[in-house]
Amino acid sequence: ALISLRQLLDHAAEHGYGVPAFNVNNLEQIHAIMQGAEALDSPVILQASAGARKYAGEPYLRHMVLAAVESHPQIPVVLHQDHGASPAVCQQSIRSGFSSVMMDGSLEPDQKTPASYDYNVWVTRRVVDMAHAVGVSVEGELGCLGSLETGQAGEEDGVGAAGALSHEMLLTDPRQAKDFVERTGVDALAIAIGTSHGAYKFSREPTGDILDIDRIRAIHAVIPDTHLVMHGSSSVPQEWLAVIREYGGEIPETYGVPVEEIRRGIANGVRKVNIDTDIRLAMTAAMRRSLATDRADFDPRKALKAATAAARSVCEARFEAFGSAGRA
Ligand code: G3H
Ligand code: 13P
Ligand code: NA
Ligand code: ZN
């Protein structure tokens, strides 16, 4: 059944687990996530970005998710809008049946320019008023995602702030988080704690103190009823990078957030864990291998099936690691 983010994350908080929120754009990604969820008895969050809605078309996306719900009646599904740029965008998604929306007021509507705190409070409050009236949950964001090493948002394909970010903007302030939640009434809050979007998060292998755990704990302590969200949570699996390179892909050395670090985040209050890049990498690797290996084949379903299986394996590993397996 389609449920709200608030319903799902309240359960996750009560039982101390985290839920991966996977970005979806097409049939194969939705298949992969739902097959994995069914196999491991996990609830799921399917999230669609503006880019996803543009790629698939809003009605296609909506109907594919409805098909997922119909095909897996036992699995709780949240349909969440990722990084809403304005109240108008959120309103559209609410109208089209999303059970949760993110208003990303940490950036202006261009989703490039860091926004003022007052702007963030104002737009987020507007979305909460609109969404809560019809039982839809709201995720806000406080702080800007980016690399603590370089001060850059780090997203190669244009997601996130442009230009350099100050150290202060890269880490969410617990006192401001408390004020923000009091003034907006959000159900979930995305916080900046050391992660960034995309495949190029860290240029060296992380040693194990990637996340600012003390800060997660401090924020969780002051807003215990607001569910913490970690964006930029892909682990950038080295084994899939190796397959991409083996079959002609060109991806320079790069590292993501180790799954073990995410588990520490969950143990300290993180509940929603956003993952897009890992599924992209696994699918691309599997498609490259399939097309290169079965050279006489021209049925695209073969490569797409391999991609689905690869994505499913990523999803299953995350359901297990984050503790959502067995919770459906
Ligand atoms: O946060 C961004 C997600 O990775 C979505 O990326 O805008 O390319 O769909 P996208
Ligand atoms: P990754 O790029 O690390 O997968 O993060 C995705 C994300 O945060 C979507 O909102
Ligand atoms: Na989101
Ligand atoms: Zn994000």
Image (tube, helix red, strand yellow):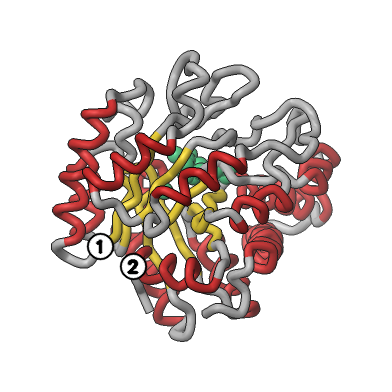
Task: Specify the quadrant of the image occupied by residue 160.
Answer: top left
Please indicate, yes or no, whether residue 302 appears anywhere in the rendered image: no
In this rendering, is residue 167 above or below 228? above
Task: Specify the quadrant of the image occupied by residue 8.
Answer: bottom left
Left or right, residue 264 beside residue 83: right
Residue 165 or residue 197, whichever sits in front: 165
- Per the image, the residue denoted by label 1 is 136
Judge the density around disc 1: few (<14), some (14-19), many (≥20) Cα neighbours within 10 Å.
many
Picture coordinates of residue 90 (x, y %)? 24, 48
Q: Which amino acid type is marked by label 2?
A: Ser
Q: Which amino acid type is marked by label 1?
A: Val
Residue drawn at x 35%, y 52% is: 81
Residue drawn at x 28%, y 28% is: 117
Total count of labels: 2
Look at the numbered discs 2 and 1 and tell me whether their residues touch, using CB distance below 8 Å: yes
Q: CA distance from mark 2 to mark 1?
A: 6 Å
- Per the image, the residue denoted by label 2 is 4
- Local secondary structure at mark 2: loop
Q: Quadrant of the N terminus?
A: bottom left
Residue drawn at x 56%, y 41% is: 232
Looking at this view, name the residue that lies furthest to the bottom: 74
Please indicate, yes or no, whether residue 167 appears anywhere in the rendered image: yes
Picture coordinates of residue 280 (x, y %)? 61, 47
Judge the density around disc 2: few (<14), some (14-19), many (≥20) Cα neighbours within 10 Å.
many
In this rendering, is residue 274 above or below 271? above
Picture coordinates of residue 179 (x, y %)? 29, 40
Indicate which disc residue 172 carries: none
Task: Specify the quadrant of the image occupied by residue 297.
Answer: bottom right
Residue 97 or residue 230, whichever sits in front: 230
Picture coordinates of residue 112 (x, y %)? 38, 23
Residue 78 or residue 303, whichever sits in front: 78
